[in-house]
Amino acid sequence: MSGGEDGNMHVPVPPHREGGTSFPDPSTIPAGHHKKVPIDCEGSETRDIAYGLLRVLNDEGDAVGEWNPNLDSETMKNALQHMIRIRAYDDRMMMMQRQGRLSFYMKCLGEEAVSVGAAMAMEQQDIVIPSYRQQGLLFVRGRDMVDMICHCISNSRDNVKGRQMPVHYSWKEGNFVSISSPVGTQFPQAVGAAMAFAYRGEDSIACSWLGEGTSAQGDFHYGLNFASVYKAPCVLVVVNNQWAISTHRNIAHGGESFAGRGIPYGVASMRVDGQDFLAVYAAHKWATERARAGYGPTLLEMYTYRGDSHSSSDDPSIYRPSDEYENWPLGDPIDRLKGHLEKLGEWDDEQHQTCEEICKAEVTAAYKEAEKFGTLKEGPFPPRSTLFEDVYEEEPWHLLEQRGQVGI
């Protein structure tokens, strides 16, 4: 429904996937199109990239343009292996959920490069405040897979003691802040952490992610405004995977670009091909260097596609075609990096198949190991006493009273 003389309210319709004004068509914004800007530029100088599309890998599998990070083949193979491992992990965990051995799960099919590229461009000291679907941050930073699975099962080895939904990971030692179901809260938190780093004269930065649907909430603008005003050393990422849960991206934003929202705030902003690992890495490397050098925040829009359901509780066939991911014009991140390495003579189908088999075996072994610490139905689970822990340094009277009521 659109507005007009009859007074009808405009209701956005789903965007076309095949190209045109609603989609940055790869044929109209080729790889290597955008010039690289210096890290000390004004935010306004990034406008073309904010409304364009930063791409490094072209359709033939070549890395081209000034944004090419010129990574060595071993680094790229490491990135590809991380993405293959994530996909194997996701497939296994979703299968376990369907079998009733896991209560809930969220896959990141199609978005693997978004997190792997970011993690590999950052330093271990940098704090990350993610949304869901950034499993790659944990894999790149070396989180033990058994511990990840124990959290999802909520067994006796769950490091958050059953207090979070599955896939809402938390890992203090890896500077990975607990994922929050009230999406949007992470942007202001990341900016606050970044301001604290700057105040203390530390070299760390903060990076945070949220989905394009969440960007319609006030938290997005609060975070962006504070980041702009205080030149906070942070990277704020909108993962535009085209769909929130059942609502398309046009419901969240009436303009052309989510990255373009940063320009009026004076924040350096870029829209990035999220299926292109090299572009994701290059954009994050530039943004982290800018933040660490004291030139302020960057807003990145990762233009990607959620290839599977929003979660194990969602049926995407109700609101979108089942073959839409296969027809996504920017392709699949694993296939594209694989093609680039093949063109360099550094990878082939046999190596790829071997890597897939190794990763599947790793995940299977890790799941079996995790269930030694308890299963979803039979436990053992974290003891009831943990309900009263880790909130107050000294337990107040009302919690002591409640402990007595449950007999612990």
Image: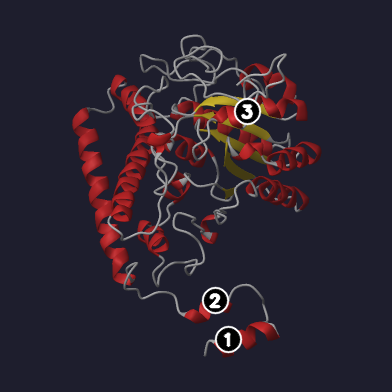
State how far apart marks 3 and 1 are (Cα). 48 Å
Question: Image height check: is 329 above or below 371?
Answer: above
Give whichever of 178, 254 is nearer the camera: 254
Question: Image height check: is 216 above or below 183?
Answer: above
In the rendered structure, which amino acid carries the disc numbered 3? Phe
Give whichever of 105, 66 is nearer the camera: 105
Q: Callout 3 environment at 10 Å: few (<14), some (14 to 19), or many (20+)?
A: many
Kindly check if marks 3 and 1 are in contact, taking CB atoms under 8 A apart as contact. Answer: no
The disc, 2 or 3, on the residue closer to the chain's N-terminal end is 3
Q: What scheme was used to colour the molecule?
A: secondary structure
In the rendered structure, which amino acid carries the disc numbered 1? Arg
Tell me which residue sits at (62%, 26%) in the image: 11
Horizontal arrangement in the rendering, residue 406 relative to residue 306 (left or right): right
Q: Position of residue 159 (x, y in %)?
A: 47, 66
Marker disc for residue 387 = 2
Instruction: Name the residue that disc number 3 marks.
Output: 258
The disc, 1 or 2, on the residue closer to the chain's N-terminal end is 2
Q: Secondary structure at mark 3?
A: loop
Instruction: Name the residue that disc number 1 marks.
Output: 403
Q: Callout 1 environment at 10 Å: few (<14), some (14 to 19), or many (20+)?
A: some
